[in-house]
Image (tube, helix red, strand yellow):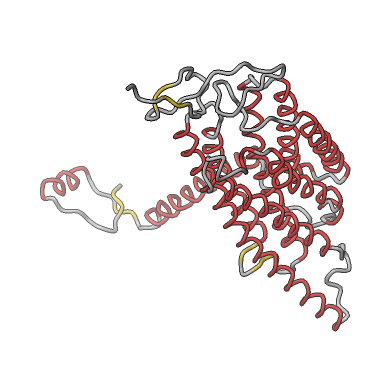
Amino acid sequence: MSAPTTTSFNFNPSTTATTTTATPTCFSAVPDKNGYVPYGSCGSNYLYYPSFGGAIAFAILFGISLFLHIFQAFTFKKWKLCWVVIMGVAWEFISFATRAAGAKLQQSVALATVNQLLFLLAPIWINAFIYMIMGRMIYFFVPEQKIWGVKGMLIGRIFVWLDIISFLTQVGGGLLIQPSNDEKTILTGIHVYMGGIGFQEFCIIIFTAIGVKFYLVMVERERENASSSGDLLDTRPTNWRWLLYVLFATLALITARIIYRIVEFAAGLDPAKNPLPYKEVYNFVLDALPMLLAVLLLNLVHPGRILQGEGSEFPKGPSRKEKRAAKVEKRLAAAEKKAIKNAAKRSKYDSVPAYVHTPREHRRDRRSGQHQHGDAYV
């Protein structure tokens, strides 16, 4: 009796035949009018049937937030700060726009890949925006411009670079988590991606502690200001609390999304044991919705409303032209210093009384190897 054959999912649309239980494979299916084929069949690019209406709804909402962030960046003259959140919201918008298109063209690998990758990575931009805002708040509001001895400018830079590391890690994992890849590749991508979001959450926890310390410092300073009738915050907005609360709320929403992703990927790919990857409603409620609320909160309490005036931005560093001019000036100063030193040496020897030797005495001294130190030969 021959060995029984079964059909099991391989995530690889190039596999087209059934085989024995020892070799996982996919089965053929006829696509419907939108290109949908059931989970486990060859050519399946989605783990669920993507909702066209849901994707359109989120694309519109993220599009509205994107328009508002662009408008606010120019209105408050904060383009250098706000381009980061604009990138994040734009990636969310493009992700759902491509998902809406993919819902009607489900055989398109390109649409599925762009949707998946941007959807997984967009929150990183929003996270970096929070870091940049907090660094400026410390620089603007705290008289010492530092928390725990670390300057606000440096805090922003450190956490943005940590966010970049997390971003690159998640990119590497996200590129591997594609339905068109085989199961082993997808699992490797999941592990890499989980490492990236785990590191992201670790940074968020540390950053939240910095935010709490900032709150305590500001409350104490305001108390001192009130008791001494000082003018610590007289020339600056006093509604820093609302912006800080929005930062905390945004970090909480990002954390909720990270927890969802960790649980989703940690539970494996078996639909019977882990329904999270195979139900789009979880994507909408536990990932898209928290990020939508986060960017809308940042629209509502925009940092440009609070961070206004002198000290609201980090000081500009020298331009390339100024750096080149500084290098030239440094070289000229070094050359001038060397010239002065050489001139001092020459003047020292020139001040020694000259002793005139006759040619015969010169020849005699050379033959005898004698040298007269301290006298200048003429």
Residue 287 in the image, given as x and y percentages of width and height: 69, 45
Give above or below for 265 relative to 250.
above
| Residue drawn at the location 15% of the way across and 46% of the way down | 366
Q: Quadrant of residue 94?
A: top right
342 to the left or right of 94: left
Give above or below for 224 relative to 238.
below
| Residue drawn at the location 63% of the way across and 39% of the way down | 120
User: Camera-side residue: 329 or 350?
Assistant: 329
Residue 191 in the image, given as x and y percentages of width and height: 49, 44
Residue 86 in the image, given as x and y percentages of width and height: 76, 39
Quarter of the image that includes the N terminus: top left
Residue furthest out toward the left: 368
User: Camera-side residue: 376 or 181?
Assistant: 181
| Residue drawn at the location 66% of the way across and 22% of the way down | 36
Residue 125 can be seen, yes or no: yes
Residue 26 in the image, given as x and y percentages of width and height: 50, 24
